[in-house]
Amino acid sequence: WRFMDRLAAELLIFLATIDPVGTLALFVGLTASVAPQERTRIALRAVAYSAAILVAFVVLGELFLGSLGIRLVSFQLSGGIIFFLFGVQMVFGRGATSPNATPEPGHDIAIFPLAVPSIASPGAILAAVVLTDNRKFSLAEQALSTALLLAVLGLTLILLLQANRIHAWIGNAGANLLVRILGLVLAALATEMVLDAVEELLGTRAG
């Protein structure tokens, strides 16, 4: 049961930080005047770029932090605080994504704002690093966490490919409700992350 609880918690964290529902709403607005075939290509590119960014942080994130002299427990503590703030924003109507973000002139909207900062959000990057901690998880467990990450990205792609149909079905009210529920869950999980990090820091000092 402990293993399944951890999987469920990680899945919920990835769902909340990648925020497929918030990305769906942003995608519908950004591609309203785009031809269907081009909309599909934008969705595919956005998810592919996001996957590359997040997997890179899974593989190299701890090395990068180590080169800066940052302990992973410190990153976990700060990540938990940021997750909590994301959750509060989602609950009170400001998603983990940037709903007011607009593409820069001459730039690919699949990169900005869809891949970054919407799908590969700062919260998702934090999750990718913290949930594949070499100190706590075996290589198999890290691979499983990466598979969960890719599964959420796959779900995001499915939603984007069916964006207009899904958004018309659930409406703005339904999308907002789902985002708020995910925000509440994320805030609770973030609290647990902060408490775990504080306990580890206190234990290290006591030792």
Image: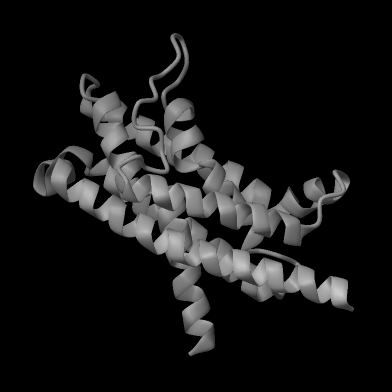
Q: Which of 97/32 is in front?
A: 97
| Tally of marks | 0
Residue drawn at x 53%, y 84% is 3
- Place residue 194 in its image quadrant: bottom right
| Residue farthest toward the bottom in the current orientation of the protein | 1
Residue drawn at x 16%, y 50% is 174
Q: Which of 98/103 is in front?
A: 98
Q: Quadrant of the C terminus?
A: bottom right
Residue 78 image point, x, y percent: 65, 52
Residue 113 image point, x, y percent: 44, 28
Q: Kindly tell me whether residue 153 is visible in this rendering.
A: no
Residue 82 image point, x, y percent: 56, 49
Q: Which of 186/116 is in front?
A: 186
Q: Is residue 73 left or right of residue 46?
A: right
Q: Is residue 32 left or right of residue 65?
A: left
| Residue farthest toward the top in the current orientation of the protein | 105
Residue drawn at x 79%, y 46% is 64
* Vertical arrangement, residue 99 with respect to residue 85, above or below: above
Q: Is residue 15 left or right of residue 29?
A: right
Tell me the colour scheme of the image.
Answer: one colour
Residue 75 image point, x, y percent: 71, 54
* Vertical arrangement, residue 94 with respect to residue 57, above or below: above
- Place residue 134 in its image quadrant: bottom right
Residue drawn at x 30%, y 25% is 30
Q: Kindly tell me whether residue 64 is visible in this rendering.
A: yes
